[in-house]
Amino acid sequence: MAAAADSRAVDAAVEILEKGGSAVDAAIATHAVLGLVEPQSSGLGGGAFMLVYERENKELTYFDGRETAPAGATIDMFMRDGEVLGFFESWQSGLAIGVPGTLALYKSAHEAHGKLPWAELFQPAIRLAQNGFKVSPRLANYMPMMAERGRLDEDPGAAAYFYPDGEALQVGDLRTNPEYADTLTRVAAEGIDAFYSGEIAEAMANAAQEGPDGGSLTAQDIARYRAVDREVICGGFRDMKICTTSPPSSGAAQIMIAGLYDHLASGAANQADKIAAFVDAQRLAYADRDYYFGDPDTIDVPLHDLIDPEYLRHRATERIAPDAVPIHGDPGMVLHQESAALLWGPDTTAEVAGTTHFSIVDNQGNAVAMSATVGGPFGSSRWVAGFLLNNELTDFALAVRPDGKPVANAVGPGKRPRSSLSPTIVLDENGELLMVTGSVGGNSIPAYVAKTIIGVFDWGLSAQEAVDFPNIVARGEPVRVEVSVEPGPAIAADLATRGYDVQERQGENAASHVIVVRPDKLEGAADPRREGIVKAVTVP
């Protein structure tokens, strides 16, 4: 089964699975197509996290393909005269471009878990780029906004592709991308060196440095990039294990939210009480995530303390009044009588939603949860060799504190910015697969993903019902409730009665794609808020 944000990407996954490919093989083919048909969300010019489950030995592997800052990055590079650059000024600048990590992730994952030949995995995307694909409503609907608010129509390559002859792409237009086909053809034949060195790498560096708002990214920065195999972290939830990605991902927030929820909901008399417990679990977990998480290669993230059951039990007792602003806890003091909370200043990260997520299970019971991004919609809007470059460095905390106190997610040379991406896999007590999940949505991702886990395993929902359920996001003081989906209005009204600062939303930028393993079948879900589908295929 494959669940992803576009039917053509799911078709690519099915094609590879039918040939006997592994879940990782199918994931690479899926994402290569997504980079073509939904360039607003992810692509070769961005980064990704992949979580892999191998059923035979019950092992999980985590590949970190997060973008890195160039060697010339400085802590204050997004500031001018003591003020942070304006959002669009930084978002569309060369300063925001990090070294892309997606292709390096492909290589590491394929070497460890691939079955089919490397070159075969790119054929669905190459065919689609050569023969053309129909422009979807979501892609076409972005065109007017990006012309008005961004620079997609100003970069020569991007303008020629998205606004041919000065006219924006329309729904149903057949669009070819021969440059993308050529890039993938080279990568298929030569490996990732074709991307990380030579003319493509030089073109990426030149695009990043171009103009008065250019950055310092060089071809040497690109050549130095490596994907990283990182620790998979697991935490107990009932008689299950939530297993997910460690920082710079925010996957650990899933363990924190679920653990806190268990304590806070223990006395819940009804579903409304459970929703309030879910809100408070988010508020506490987000406060800790925002304060402590960053690049684990450059700062000491007290990760195991933050997900320690004893700390979560204590943290749940710190449930605060609905109208109060949540603050971070101190796991070091709780567990070791040694404070971990004095290191950092308050976080100032403002993460934008431009991401894709997909879930895959193969015929051996192996699974992949993969989340990928280029940052904000269409990344930096800078076009190279058939794809867009990311603007992921705006995921750092951009403001430098006047008192000089460091922030965990500060900019630094070679650093990976914190990400909200949270690909997650749930296992039973015997290590067998129960769920593959993840979502898009910037800083709201931890809330969206936690809803699917708690919805299925505590609220008794099917995979699709859990995805369809109103999104509730509680980061900081306000609580956002999606009232365009039932029973959203009733949830918003109840939370307001309880004293929460409720912000009613007509929609949320979510796209959760989920697979649940039932005793007799795979049960999939695609988020109706996007254009995704689920497809199952029988493979001997």
Image (cartoon, helix red, strand yellow):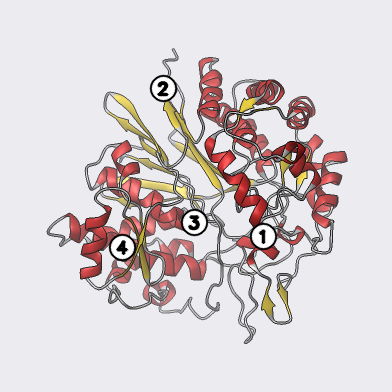
Q: Amino acid at mark 2?
A: Ala
Q: Secondary structure at mark 2?
A: loop
Return the residue at label 2: 536
For the question of whether residue 228 can be seen, the reply is no
Q: Earlier in the sequence, mark 3 or mark 1?
A: 1
Residue pointed to by mark 4 = 279
Amino acid tagged 4: Val
Q: Which residue is mark 1?
A: 91
Spot occupied by residue 194 in the image (x, y as percentages of width and height): 81, 35
Q: Secondary structure at mark 1?
A: helix
Which of label 3 and label 1 is nearer to you?
A: 1
Q: Name which residue lies at 31% across and 54% down.
A: 483
Residue 461 image offset from top left, x and y in percent: 25, 41
N-term mark: 4 or 3: 3
The secondary structure type at the circle numbered 4 is: helix
Q: CA distance from mark 1 to mark 4?
A: 31 Å
- The amino acid at mark 1 is Trp
| Residue at the left extreme of this rendering | 269
- The amino acid at mark 3 is Ser
User: Looking at this view, is 412 or 202 the one in front?
Assistant: 202
Percent position of residue 540, x then y: 44, 12
Disc 2 packing (10 Å; few <14; some 14–19; many ≥20): some
In the depicted view, which residue is nearer to us: 6 or 279?
6
Q: Nearer the viewer, mark 2 or mark 1?
A: 1
What residue do we see at 46% from left, 34% from top? 532
**Which is closer to the viewer, label 4 or label 3?**
4
Q: Which mark is residue 250?
A: 3
Asked if disc 3 and disc 2 are in contact, CB closer than 8 Å, the reply is no
How far apart in space, not on screen, are marks 4 and 2 (Cα)? 34 Å
